[in-house]
Amino acid sequence: MASYRLNIMICAGTGCVSNRAFQIREAFDKEIRKNSLEKEVLTVMTGCNGFCAAGPIVIVQPEGIFYQKLTVKDIPFLVEEHFLKGRPVKKFMYTPPKETEPIPKMNDISFFQKQVLIALRNKGIIDPEAIDDYIARDGYAALSKILSKMKPQDVIAEIKKSGLRGRGGGGFPTGLKWELARKAEGEQKYVICNADEGDPGAFMDRSIVEADPHTILEGMTIGAYAIGASKGFVYVRSEYPLAVERMHNAIAQSKEYGLLGDNILESGFNFDVDVIQGAGVFVCGEETSMIASIEGKIGEPKPRPPYPVEKGLWGSPTNINNVETWANVPAIILRGSDWFSKIGTKTSKGTKVFSVAGKIKDAGLVEVPMGLTLGEIIYDVAGGIHSDKKFKAVLIGGPSGGCLPADCLGLPVDYESLTKAGAMMGSGGLVVADEDNCMVEMARYFLNFTKDESCGKCTPCREGNAAMLDILTRITQGEGTMEDLDLLEDLAHAIKDTALCGLGNTAPNPVLTTLRYFRDEYIAHIKDKKCPAHECRQLNTYTIDEERCVSEGHGCDVCRRNCAYDAIMGEKGKAHRINQDKCAKCGVCYEVCKFAAVKVD
Amino acid sequence: MTHENFEPKLVGFLCTWCSYTGADLAGTARMDYAPNMRVIRVMCSGRVDPQFVLKAFKEGADGVLISGCHPGDCHYQEGNYKALRRHRLLSKLLEQLGIEKERFRLEWVSAAEGAKFQKVCNEFTEEIRNMGPLNLNGGIHEQAKA
Amino acid sequence: MPKLTLKDLQKKREEVKKSVILREGGDYKAKVTVHMGTCGIAAGARKIMDSLLAEVEKFDARDVLVTTSGCAGLCSREPMATVELVGKAPVKYVDLDAEKMKKIFEEHVQGGNIVTEYALAYGSEKTSY
Amino acid sequence: MVKLTIDGKKVEVEEGTTILQAAEKLEIPIPTLCYHPLLEPYAACRVCMVELKGETCKLVPSCNTKVAEGMEIETKSERAVKARKLNLELIMARAPAAEKVQELAKEMGIEKTRFEIIDPDEKCILCGLCVRTCEEIVGANAISFANRGKDRMVFTPYGEPSEACIGCTACAFFCPTEAITFEDIHKRLVVHEEMELGPSTAVRVPIRQAVPMVPFIDEDSCIHFKTGECKICERVCEKEAINHEMEDEEIEVEVGSIILASGFKSFDASRIPAYGYGRYENVITALEFEKLVNASGPTSGKILMTNGNEPQAVGIVHCVGSRDKKYNEYCSRVCCMYSLKFAHLLKEKTNAEVYDFYIDMRCFGKGYEEFYHRLMKEGTNFIRGRVSEVTDMPLTEKEEGKLIIRVEDTLLGEIRRIPVDMVILATGLEPGIDQNEIAKVFNISCSQDSFFLERHPKLAPVSTFSDGIFLAGACQSPKDIPDTVAQAGAAASQALALADKGTFELEPITAVINEELCAGCQLCVSLCPFTAINYNAEKGISEINDALCKGCGTCVSACPSGASQQKHFRDEQIFAEIEGIFIE
């Protein structure tokens, strides 16, 4: 192994890959060869770095210089300037908003400072397709420890002591789950990694699988050893091709090394893992539906009990955990449950990976200790609201979560407090909405998702969600009535109470929380037939400030030409006016008018 | 010697189950037929011993008839098949003794075929009448009688 | 690659650790900068760099940061390199070759005392007024 | 055992019972739609939600939640009722045409659904009973659910008719709202003999009037023999009287005597093309008319033509296939009387004009003649003559669309054309289908019309030539029920008499072998059809077993040494008979 002096860590998460990360790597290699630095400088593709808003991201180690938003044409200059001449290039660095000086080192950027990495400990450092990198980072050390020194019961005790809880959203204590699975009889037992992650706007599991597939395999092997399972499945969405490919690759490599399959590390313990691709069904994220899907049946939930830990896949005890839960296991075993239980709050231990998106400056993937407040995540870590608009709400937990208003920003992020506020931890999707977002529209958007994704088995979810969606659509079109509001609330409670599976129980959450915290917006839509955030176009009225149209825009006539309903009158150079009864309220004139002469009310 | 006023003497061996009952039926049905045949009842046509036929001819019979059940109907399953075999062999033997084959007949008459029995008797009598008396041993009887 | 036992895994870990340490950042006790300006390269800076990297490899000097820089301004004394121990002023060495570089590495970088006969200057140029 | 309280009432049930079953025990009604006791609970309609009190009091589906010690259930809590009503309202919007849902709604006090109705005549409530029946009970897996959310539907693969479907209609049977129905694709209007008289399910009684009225499993239509699944009847039969594994087995029964009562076959009317049976739909045989008139028949007793309306005029034709040289010369004895019965029924049940075509009205039985006179008073038209043809070719419009019966009325001495809507052919009786095989098996002979031959028409009408085998019923000759019953009695008493005697009469005329003369040539042994002779090796002679010897005498005539002699038919005796013939 020639020792290099520079490692160029190129982020190859799906976000950056779609931003031409692979082409950037080729450009780097070409330039490095041109400058004959190939013996000194090594380019390494890594998993998702987390700071997706700044993609494509490259980190030059060992100096830890953070480059962002690179394009292929920047590479030659960068290679020569920094790699050859040793001068880091300022203009590619990250400059925080409202400041002029860029921050060269990654760890000094606010986005990374408050993060504590456990599940994402190897992101940006190892090449996910090289098992050696993982082993170098104490990979499979935890597995060696348990196989040589610990009995299954000790492993379970350690996980219980650590206070680790399910990261899929339910927050069920993992140690207890493993114990139940161990006690259930059945000589063939299974462990499953739930990487279905159907929430729109959530990409944590994808990034973990892409960045560090081995930690999941090691976690599952440890879990299997603890429970006495000999077969495991990683259930990945087919919409994550890169994650599927990397997981297959990781399985092959670990089998080659004897860290998976028969007689692992000569210990006599056998454990094999297969990858199952989800067929694009959101409900298959739910345990029993996933089991049905793996069994080749229609992805449809079964009533519980019996819980999968007693009777799961093909009737045998099955332990299902989320990607992030498995990723935490090796770290806990290696560094001990005391170290882990010190992080987080009294009831929610460890860290949580959030995918922050929506009207946020620094959207991306963050892993923060439990207990951090929502406000800290949004403002300190994610850099606050985009173009400094006013914060309105944050939706946490995807379509099963809830919209929390500004006064919940002080809430610490842990299972109990979020559920109390009406939302839920969920898998960790965090969508920020600002003043331009209409909360009724947001609830409608998520309901539209759950309506399509409902498996259709039980009445409340199949029919109830669709009925709620009709009511919400009517409200956003200004045809809602106050009775609709009461019916909506009754429906939401009934569905939450009587739905058969998690999807149905949590689908009304967006409606219930928006009703609870933003009831005034609903009433505005119903009574005044107005949408405060102007997002429900049907309720907007567009008028032209004729004086400004002439003084600023000199009657540029752009709006008239773009109006598909020829609802705008006026010639070039003169003031224009909108004919209200022809106007379809499509909002195109508002968008094309460069002189803000078109007003929306 | 013309034969018109010659009354042949016939001997008939009838099996109890079919032919004898058939003959009985002909009687109860008031059918009339040639009285020339004298009947001997045997349990089955299989019982008829070739010696009986030879004895009959020796005693002066001009014709001998064996009548049994239709093949397959025999009360004793196979008796009539045995009679059939013996009839074929015995006919050959009789020819060698100078007795025309036609004088020895085998018929199947079932219990319901009263009419058939009537037909057989009449035909057989006519046939023998046309053939004339047997005069087996040079008409010993006639001489003895005379 | 045969199946690993526990011992093999441990041995493998030691072996591959080197390549990852570099990436983990962390503190360094020394930084050696080889000046690779156009004239520096022409004067043989590349050979200096190779021998320096070979030394690092030999001594398994995990805590030495090797970087390059552009032209240091003293074209006549190329190839040059600067050695900067933590907390000490950087020392610039001139007219180097592979041999001298090895010596500097052993005595200064590892040993901690400056090789005066090759050194040109002590301390670093002023960059701001 | 688990103790819990439902609506304040205490109840104790075994482990594993569901809340619904416990409530049923307390006669507390809980609405259900997708639940069926024979199927795994599916818990999809969510109409059976009840409130489970406790620290997290929540609603649970009563159909599949197992009871637990100390549970406190409220079936009528305000929250549970509200949720149930809302779910039902949602179902009403999905399936407005489903009666069961409307009834349930009335019970729960919901008049109208507040939700949008998409398809007003939709009946399917997606309860999955059909799919689960096809999977769990029938085991054919022919249908399943397709699509997700609102467009979920019960479907066959690609919507094509599924080969897996065995057409057992179990799905339609289990469907609570008749969303699945089945129709007989080949419409059969014509009443034919094979029409069953009674229910046509896989487990059924042969006909309603069957004696004994014992159900049987029809292997062709029973699902178990098609897919190996189901066995519902076995599960619900309290007496555990059903065992699908039983097979037909042949058992040998030692009997002293046998009574043959193998019955008759009715004459196949299609053998007379002129009468148009099989060509015209409304020409039916007497047996088919019996089924038409039978209360459990296809028309439950109403006399209808194939197009469903009542006939205006009916013709009954006697002696179809009887008293006819071309078919059966004998008179079938019963047709006249049942034809009169038909005429009477027709007069009684319909106001049709009845024509009866007879040759001689044979009302030989007790009260038969009086019945005939009554018929005449009722106005049945009796026409004496043999019907030559039934045709549908009209000569006048009055005959349009009618069946015309052409007959020579021997009393009027003219040929007449009678237009009728329906013709009943009084088909005669013929020996049973397997008459000859039975005769061969029991070694009895048949009379000319191939009915079994009795030993003697007057002296022994019920016994046959073989001792111990007796005859009863129409297999011996056509007869009606009174005669058959009388003959059956006679045959039974004869059989009993034989059995009662206790001794067994040997044939007096068996053969016997004279030991001195027998040379042991064993010629007779292979000869005897009844294997009554066996060779005695020590003595070196053959011996006859008296019990087996039937006395045919074949062995006697074959014995070269004359050792075998038949009692009463010894050679000397027959020789003497021969000599006796020629003594003048």
Image (cartoon, coloured by chain):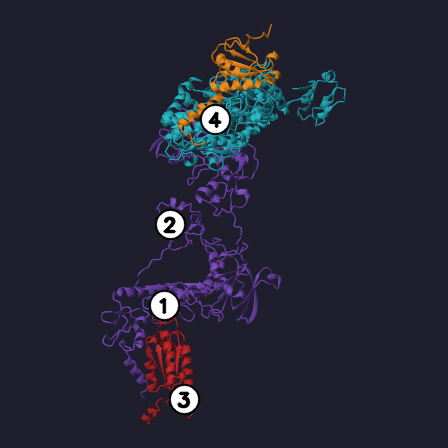
Which chain is assigned red? B
Chain seen in purple: D
Q: Amino acid at mark 4?
A: Asp
Which of the two residues, C21 or A485, is positioned nearer the viewer here?
A: C21
Going from the N terminus, do you reach mark 1 or mark 2 first? 2
Colour applied to chain C: orange
Q: Amino acid at mark 3?
A: Gly
Chain with cyan colouring:
A
| Quarter of image, res A588 | top right
C79 left or right, relative to D485: right
The numbered disc on residue B132 is 3
Write down the residue under mark 2.
Answer: D245
Chain containing the residue with disc 1: D
In the picture of the structure, the residue carrying the numbered disc 1 is D443
Q: Is residue A464 visible?
A: yes
Instruction: Please report the residue visible at 26 percent of the width from the left and 76 percent of the height from the top.
Output: D563
Output the chain of dot 4: A
Q: Position of residue A31 (x, y in %)?
A: 60, 23
Mark 2 vs mark 4: tell me if same chain.
Answer: no
**Badge 4 is on which residue?**
A132
**Disc number for residue D531:** none
